[in-house]
């Protein structure tokens, strides 16, 4: 019989998964926008009126897509697959591979988030402009980095909790 889940865990799980669903929806809209921008820019160039701004908007949208996609990909198991190493791990230790993968994601995400936070904080402090045809402050491009990676860390923590629940559930059966 599965172990009961606490209200706090269920709230954390639904919040993390809800934010991941929102991130997925926004990323999908941005991918569609990138496609529209590319088609429009290609048509404009074909008819002799190149749009210099199109590359900048598509590139900025792509940055957002990447960082918005980290956590949903991890939630769906698309980031870390430990099956590759499973045959090298002694059989008794295999039940902890999901724990190891989640902890590795937490450590990676925390370090990455710290570096992105420092980079983004510097952009917020000096208000420099991005090197682009359009006039946009760099901070509005970089701000998605720490947000997306923080959600990645929260998703990794959720995966660690779920791995522990699966381990407990197998022992209570």
Image: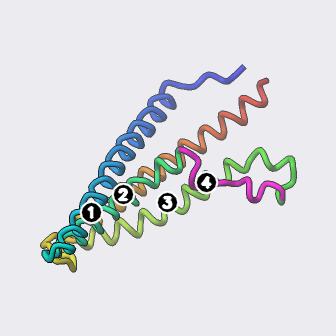
Instruction: State the image coordinates of residue 95 (x, y, percent, origin top left).
Output: 77, 44
Q: Name the residue that disc number 1 marks.
A: 39
Q: Nearer the viewer, residue 6 or 98?
A: 98
Q: Looking at the image, is mark 2 or mark 4 earlier in the sequence?
A: 2
Question: In terms of secondary structure, where does tag 2 sit?
Answer: helix
Question: In the figure, is residue 29 to the left or right of 159?
Answer: left
Q: Which residues are magenta?
A: 76-87
Hey, which residue is sitting farthest right in the picture? 91
Judging by the rendered image, the residue that carries numbered circle 4 is 103
Q: Which residue is mark 2?
A: 65
Q: Is residue 134 left or right of residue 114?
A: left
SS class of the residue under badge 4?
helix
| Spatial CA span between label 3 and label 1 | 35 Å
Residue 86 on the magenta span: yes
Please report whichever mark, 2 or 3, sits nearer to the chain's N-terminal start: 2
* Image: 47 above or below 6: below
Residue 31, x across and y down, in percent: 34, 55
In front: label 1 or label 2? 1
Which residue does the numbered mark 3 point to in the structure image? 109
- The answer to if 40 sits in the magenta stretch is no
């Amino acid at each position: 019989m599965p172990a009961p889940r606490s209200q706090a865990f269920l709230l954390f799980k639904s919040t993390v998964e809800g934010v991941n669903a929102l991130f997925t929806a926004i990323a999908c809209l941005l991918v569609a926008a990138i496609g529209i921008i590319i088609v429009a820019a290609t048509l404009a160039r074909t008819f002799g009126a190149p749009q210099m701004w199109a590359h900048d908007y598509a590139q900025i949208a792509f940055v957002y897509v990447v960082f918005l996609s980290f956590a949903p990909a991890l939630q769906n198991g698309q980031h870390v697959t430990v099956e590759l190493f499973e045959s090298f791990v002694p059989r008794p230790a295999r039940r902890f591979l999901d724990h190891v993968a989640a902890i590795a994601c937490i450590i990676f995400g925390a370090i990455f988030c710290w570096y992105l936070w420092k980079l983004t904080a510097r952009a917020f402090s000096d208000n420099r402009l991005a090197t682009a045809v359009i006039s946009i402050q760099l901070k509005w491009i970089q701000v998605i980095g720490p947000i997306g990676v923080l959600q990645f860390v929260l998703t990794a923590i959720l995966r660690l909790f779920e791995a522990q629940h699966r381990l407990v559930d197998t022992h209570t059966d």
